[in-house]
């Protein structure tokens, strides 16, 4: 099981560090195992949740709320809306997620004279993986990434996270 958790965290980290913002800038990618019958999965439980922060320049300012708890609430809401229920003893699938921010992210830009340069543009993301408890295979994975909106009010930040997770689960 430790191997599976390590693999999931690595997968989620890679998904996130590829690159949350007003809604129009959120990029979502989703994978569903073509052999998985998602409608057949009725119960879930939590495997692991993690945070990753890359911030060598100490730019990050906390948002003042427990982001893991908030993300878990949003995921739970989406699953309940799809008829999935939590089962602590014999779940059909397990949920793993990671929330990450890379404050040191650099993006290539082009100025008005066509000269390319790099600019620090912080990025954040959420990655979610669902694992079949019987086969130990990933049945569904999704990530949302976007440019960090550091000046966003806390409630707007929460709305962006809720929107991203809702959009991720439209593909579930």
Image (spheres, grey):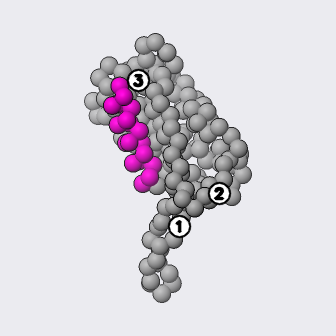
Kindly identify which residue carries mark 1.
120
Side of 24 where 97 appears, left or right: left
- Return the x and y of residue 87 as percentages of the image width and height: 49, 15
Question: Which residue is at a point 61% across and 39% down the rendered structure image?
Answer: 67
Which circle, 3 or 1, is nearer the viewer? Answer: 1
Number of the label disc, if any, that sits on residue 162: none
Kindly identify which residue carries mark 3.
93
In the displayed structure, would residue 11 be above or below residue 56? above
Question: Which residue is at a point 49% across and 15% down the rendered structure image?
Answer: 88
Q: Quadrant of the C terminus?
A: top left
**What is the count of numbered marks?**
3
**The magenta segment:** 1-18
Give the CA separation, mark 3 to mark 1.
Answer: 38 Å
Tell me, yes or no, whether the highlighted magenta stretch contains residue 2.
yes
Residue 140 makes an appearance in the image: no
Give the CA separation, mark 1 to mark 2.
Answer: 13 Å
Number of the label disc, if any, that sits on residue 150: 2
In the displayed structure, would residue 155 be above or below residue 71? below
Seen as rendered, the residue at the extreme bottom is 113
Q: Which of the two discs, 3 and 2, labels the residue nearer the N terminus?
A: 3
Question: Which residue is at a point 58% across and 56% down the rendered structure image?
Answer: 148
Badge 2 density bin: few <14, some 14–19, many ≥20, Cα 10 Å: some
Badge 1 density bin: few <14, some 14–19, many ≥20, Cα 10 Å: few
- The residue nearer to you, when weighing 93 against 97, is 97
């Amino acid at each position: 099981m430790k191997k599976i958790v390590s693999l999931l965290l690595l997968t989620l980290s890679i998904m996130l560090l590829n690159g949350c913002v007003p809604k129009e800038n959120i990029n979502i990618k989703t994978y569903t195992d073509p052999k998985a019958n998602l409608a057949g999965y009725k119960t879930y439980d939590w495997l692991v949740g993690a945070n990753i922060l890359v911030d060598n320049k100490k730019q990050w300012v906390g948002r003042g709320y427990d982001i893991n708890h908030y993300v878990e609430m949003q995921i739970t809401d989406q699953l309940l809306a799809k008829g999935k229920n939590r089962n602590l003893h014999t779940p059909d699938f397990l949920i793993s997620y990671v929330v990450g921010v890379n404050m040191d992210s650099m993006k290539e830009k082009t100025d008005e004279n066509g000269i390319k340069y790099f600019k620090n543009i912080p990025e954040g993301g959420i990655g979610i993986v669902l694992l079949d408890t019987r086969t130990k295979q990933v049945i569904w994975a999704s990530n949302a990434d976007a440019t960090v909106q550091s000046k966003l009010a806390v409630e707007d930040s929460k709305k962006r996270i809720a929107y991203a997770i809702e959009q991720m689960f439209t593909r579930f």
